Amino acid sequence: MGILLEELIQRWKYMFSALANGDHITPTDRLRAEGMMESLAMLEAGISSATIDQEMNQCFMQALGHTLSEEFGEDWREFYPFPQIPCVGQRAPVDPSTKD
């Protein structure tokens, strides 16, 4: 495993653990990791976008207890094309302030 993939794994673990704890991910953290994913797919021989997705899915499953497909559907990559990371925070509980 190359140094770039190892760094990506650490970033995914941080991001997905934060989401699991109800925290949000800054756009900067997400965008930097996505740039690293694209670089890895372009530069590292033998590492495809599918392999990168598998590694990311493992980090997601470790942090949240289910896979990306279980969270977003089997076709999640159609909505989040590579190298996008689906870092979606939990919805805030909102109570209506009026009866309408």
Image (spheres, helix red, strand yellow):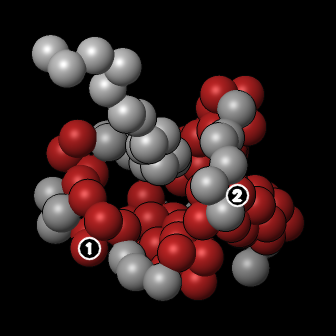
Please state if 42 lies on the left or on the right of 53 as rendered: right
Label placed on residue 27: none
Q: Position of residue 74 (x, y in %)?
A: 16, 67
Query: What element does badge 2 sit on?
Result: helix
Query: What element does badge 1 sit on?
Result: helix
Q: Are marks 2 and 1 in contact (CB under 8 Å)?
A: no
> Does the rendering let one see residue 36?
yes
Label placed on residue 18: 2
Q: Position of residue 62 (x, y in %)?
A: 58, 83
Q: Which residue is at the front of the view, 65 or 86?
A: 65
The residue under the point 28% across, 16% down is: 98
The residue under the point 15% across, 58% down is: 75
The residue under the point 30% across, 65% down is: 71
- What separation in Å lies between label 2 and label 1 (alpha carbons)? 19 Å
Label placed on residue 70: 1
Which amino acid lies under the numbered mark 2 shown in the image of this protein? Ala
Q: Position of residue 95 (x, y in %)?
A: 37, 33
Give the quadrant of the C terminus.
Answer: top left
Q: Position of residue 70 (x, y in %)?
A: 26, 73
Please state if 55 lies on the left or on the right of 68 as rendered: right
Q: Sequence-wise, which precedes: disc 2 or disc 1?
A: 2
Number of residues whose C-alpha sits closer than 10 Å to that of mark 2, classed few (under 14), some (14–19) or many (20 or more): some
**Residue 25, quarter of the rendered image:** top right
Between marks 2 and 1 in the image, the one whose residue lies nearer the viewer? 2
The residue under the point 43% across, 59% down is: 49
Which amino acid lies under the numbered mark 1 shown in the image of this protein? Glu
Q: Which residue is at the front of the view, 35 or 73?
A: 73
Number of residues whose C-alpha sits closer than 10 Å to that of mark 1, classed few (under 14), some (14–19) or many (20 or more): few
